[in-house]
Amino acid sequence: MSTTGTWLVVGLGNPGPAYAGNRHNVGAMVVDVLAARTGGSFKSHRSRAAVLEGRLGTGPGGVPGPRVVLAKPATYMNESGGPVAGLAQYYDVEPERVVVVHDELDIAAGELRVKLGGGEGGHNGLRSISRSLGTKDYLRVRVGIGRPPGRQDPADFVLKDFSSVERKELPILLEDAADAAEQLATEGLLATQQRWHAPR
């Protein structure tokens, strides 16, 4: 896979201040970290998303990294696909250059995984994106939030804010996930998996 050209990095979440601190919004939090690195600010886009165009990281010899469009859909999670497909079409980004950052119940809290394609694991945002793009073959940065304690419903768990204990570690997790998204665009999937899937 070539690493030249435009990338679309999407952070999933629900819109509005009531959801901002939820576990389900960790993808949007990661994209905010990437936005801070570019020094730019989000603007409203007709595809029902907040977008920021810039460059991520640096390439060989210190040249600026690839062009990237950072995006946060302005829709609720289960309707994320429309904005993502609209932005991919508008910016002419192929699915294999779309990076979706999202919360993942099946990964331990504080851990990361990256992959291309595969199932959606019951995640409504991913299901909507797969349907709208017409393929599951896009990149994912899977940010582990762990399973809910006891008999708590997973749907309730993801819509709760991170606990005070989790919040202490959250800045590190967000920076790590932002690094993983940046590395996908600058070095490709294999190098990113080798870094983040190795025991640390």
Image (cartoon, grey):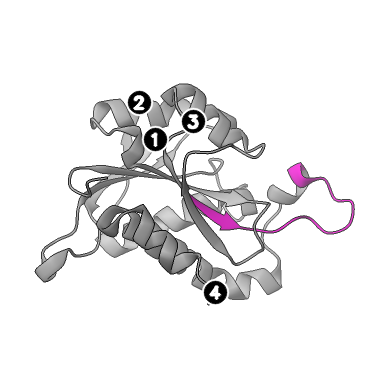
Mark-to-mark CA distance, 1 and 2: 9 Å
Q: Is residue 74 visible?
A: yes
Front residue of 74/24: it is 24
Q: Is residue 52 above or below residue 110?
A: above
**Residue, far right:** 151
Mark-to-mark CA distance, 4 and 2: 38 Å
Nearer the observer: mark 3 or 2; the answer is 3
Residue linked to disc 1: 49
Which circle marks residue 86 in the picture?
A: 2
Residue linked to disc 4: 199
Residue linked to disc 3: 129
Nearer the observer: mark 1 or 2; the answer is 2
Question: What x and y, as percent, mark residue 41?
Answer: 29, 52
Mark-to-mark CA distance, 4 and 1: 36 Å
Find out whether the residues at labels 1 and 2 contact each other: C-beta distance under 8 Å.
yes
Mark sitting earlier along the chain (1/3): 1
Mark-to-mark CA distance, 3 and 2: 11 Å
Tell me the kind of residue under disc 1.
Ala
Q: Is residue 67 above or below residue 33?
A: above
Front residue of 112/158: it is 112
Q: Is residue 48 visible?
A: no
Question: What x and y, as percent, mark residue 84?
Answer: 40, 32
Question: What x and y, as percent, mark residue 58?
Answer: 19, 65
Question: What x and y, as percent, mark residue 132?
Answer: 46, 23
Nearer the observer: mark 4 or 1; the answer is 4
Q: What is the span of residues highlighted in magenta in the rendered image?
A: 141-155
Tell me the kind of residue under disc 3.
Ile
Instruction: Name the element at disc 3.
Output: helix
